[in-house]
Image (spheres, rainbow, N blue to C red):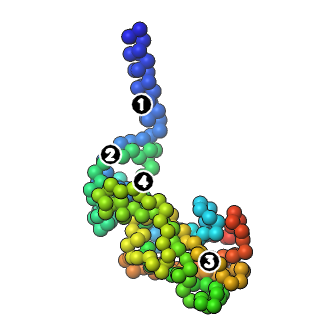
Amino acid sequence: MKSSKNIYLFLVVAIAYLISGCNGSELYYSRSYINLYNLYDGISLRRSLNRSTKNIDLCINVTHRISSQSEGADKEFYDRICTEYGDTAYNQNIYLPNGIIYPMSDYPHIAVINVTSSKDFDEAHPAGTSLNDVMSVIYSNIMEYVESGYTCTINNSTTKSLNELQPQDLAMSDGQLSLAFNKEPDELCIHTLTVECTTHTGEVMTAQISYDFRLPEGFIGDYDNL
């Protein structure tokens, strides 16, 4: 009986090992929580597919990726970013399944967001004036986790009014940024919205979207940039 149990345990361990190997998971030591940064040269906009379809996803145009697994100049750049954000004391072993490197973030992070419309929003917001006081940004707050010494819970859905957004709020965000309206315009119609983002290193990036306020929840319309 004892021999049969030993054989059973051996088989369980062997199968688990084979499954792990087939999945391609590898164990790495990581001194930083964020293991990959997406570098980008522009932004784009679309009606959200993840949260409310009334929201607008703010996406980046990725040009290059640097990570804890990079080499040479890319690895040096990655290390400089980790030092800049104070993310250097995580010191844990992590699994990277099938070579997928995560968690990830974007660099440089967006420090300022300003939204305007081609049409009058209401009496207080004529065409071309900032809509920041009637809009919010939804993001994850990873910087707070790092500053706590990796002890607090990561808030995966922080919502903040655009006119209250601080330059460091989006640092080390997971990149899933959404913009939401806190109210609707006086006239429900199509607005051409312009979103201008300024990174913490001074780059200014702009994108536009034709936003139809008449669409109910669950509909995104026909957009070329989806």
Residue contact at pointers 3 and 4, CB within 8 angstroms: no
- Where residue 55 sits: x, y (%)? 60, 69
Q: Quadrant of the N terminus?
A: top left
Residue contact at pointers 1 and 4, CB within 8 angstroms: no
Direction from residue 204 to residue 124 in the image, left or right: right
Q: CA distance from mark 1 to mark 3?
A: 54 Å
Compare residues 105 and 136 and report the one nearer the observer. 136
Residue for badge 4: 102
For marks 1 and 3 on the same chain, the one whose residue lies earlier in the sequence: 1
For marks 2 and 3 on the same chain, the one whose residue lies earlier in the sequence: 2
Residue for badge 3: 183
Eye-nearest disc, 2 or 3: 3
Three-letter amino acid code at the position of disc 2: Asn
Q: CA distance from mark 1 to mark 2?
A: 18 Å
Q: Badge 4: few (under 14), some or many (20 or more) residues near its Cα, within 10 Å? A: some
Direction from residue 60 to residue 199 in the image, left or right: left
Residue for badge 1: 17
Q: Badge 3: few (under 14), some or many (20 or more) residues near its Cα, within 10 Å? A: few
Three-letter amino acid code at the position of disc 3: Lys
- Where residue 42 sits: x, y (%)? 50, 74
State which quadrant residue 49 falls in: bottom right
Q: CA distance from mark 2 to mark 3?
A: 45 Å
Q: Residue at x 30, y 48 (%)?
A: 92
State which quadrant residue 165 falls in: bottom left
Residue for badge 2: 93
Three-letter amino acid code at the position of disc 4: Tyr
